[in-house]
Image (spheres, rainbow, N blue to C red):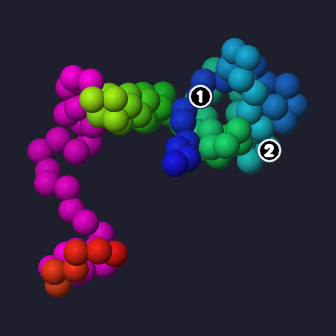
Amino acid sequence: MCIATPMRLDRVEGALGGAGPEAVDLTLVPEARPGDWVLVFLGVARRRLEAAEAGRIAAALSGLAAAMDGRDADIDALFPDLAGRTPSLPPHLEAARAAGLKKA
């Protein structure tokens, strides 16, 4: 599974930026500057992020890692956008569930 992750740039050198030893291609986000948060997928920055959004993504990724590792974690705190609501399926999957389909 491939997941985009937030990265805070500490340097920008032409079309490349990075955080520590990790380099990222900034071709799609040429306006990025040191200190900016970017969403990185497969080594390429896809878009700039506000710091708050980068924090929410990082928390969700931590929650996912905790769940996958079987660690005790306050999952609700790591996914605040899901608090207080019941998750729902996309319409096509809900229709299949309602029809009793067991396998996709």
Residue 22, horizontal then vertical, whole percent: 71, 23
Q: Which residue lies furthest to the bottom in this view?
A: 99
In the image, farthest residue toward the front: 103
Label 2 sits on residue: 27
The correct choice, above or below, for 104 with respect to 17 in the image is below
Spatial CA span between label 1 and label 2: 15 Å
Q: Can residue 78 be found in the magenta stretch?
A: yes
Does residue 68 sit above or below 9 in this rendering?
A: below
Q: Residue 17 carries which label?
A: none
The magenta segment: 71-98
Using a 10 Å C-alpha cutoff, classify the residue at mark 1 as few (fewer than 14 neighbours), some (14 to 19) or many (20 or more): many
Quadrant of residue 75 within the rendered picture: top left
Residue behind mark 1: 7
Residue 30 picture quarter = top right
The numbered mark, 1 or 2, whose residue comes first in the sequence reads: 1
Q: Where is residue 88 in the image (x, y as percent from the top left)?
A: 21, 62
